[in-house]
Amino acid sequence: MTPSNGLIVVLVLLFLVACQTNPEAINRNGQDQCAACKMMISDYQFATELVTSKGRVYKFDAIECLVPYLNEQADVAFNHMLVTDYYSPTDLIDATAAVYLQSPEIDSPMGGHLAAFSSMEDAEKAQQEYSVTIYQWDALLLLTNFQ
């Protein structure tokens, strides 16, 4: 392999790595900032993330920050829309498949009282603990008031 071929291979690999559209882990030491409200993400049960088709990652401290931001970005293609599973705060799950609960007893960072669950079974378990309203993704996107 000639030096110029080696350089081409390295450049192609760098390009491929730079163009990935994979989600990123939410930083667990308070260094990630919410793309909407600019608060530091500190309560990981409520953290969310959007990844554009170009690989740009936007992180949010709460579902109630993500939803208005997403609605304002109707012309942007997102490869990943992720929320944190309330019962498993280290797991980001597909936002479109999650089940959402809203209750004054759920203390989310921005006061929207929203939490995401990976299954209806988990949501129903939480429903027994809290007085809640249950939402699916499409209904959640229609909410304009999170209080």
Image (spheres, rainbow, N blue to C red):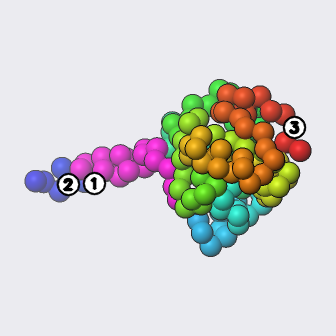
Q: Residue at x 72, y 29 (%)?
A: 139
For marks 3 and 2, the one nearer the N-term is 2
Mark 2 burial class by Cα count in 10 Å: few <14, some 14-19, many 20+: few
Overall secondary structure of the magenta section: helix
Question: Residue beneath label 2, please?
Answer: 6
* Picture coordinates of residue 123, whole percent (x, y): 64, 45
In the image, residue 133 sits, relative to residue 30, either above or below, namely above
* Picture coordinates of residue 57, whole percent (x, y): 57, 48
Q: CA distance from mark 1 to mark 2?
A: 6 Å
* Picture coordinates of residue 6, whole percent (x, y): 20, 54
Write down the region rendered in magenta: 8-25
What label sits on residue 44 in the rendered view? Answer: none
Q: Helix or strand or loop: what does disc 1 sit on?
A: helix
Q: Is residue 21 left or right of residue 11?
A: right
Q: CA distance from mark 3 to mark 2?
A: 56 Å
> Looking at the image, which residue sits at the far front?
128
Amino acid, disc 2 = Gly
> Looking at the image, which residue sits at the far left?
1
The quarter of the picture where residue 43 lies is: bottom right
Q: Residue at x 23, y 50 (%)?
A: 9
Question: Residue beneath label 1, please?
Answer: 10
What label sits on residue 145 in the rendered view? Answer: 3
Q: CA distance from mark 3 to mark 1?
A: 50 Å
Which of the two marks, 3 or 1, is nearer to us in this view?
A: 3
| Front residue of this view, candidates 87 and 59 | 87
Q: Is residue 33 visible?
A: yes
Amino acid, disc 3 = Asn
Q: Helix or strand or loop: what does disc 2 sit on?
A: helix
User: Residue 22 in magenta?
Assistant: yes
Which of the two marks, 3 or 2, is nearer to us in this view?
A: 3
The quarter of the picture where residue 124 lies is: top right
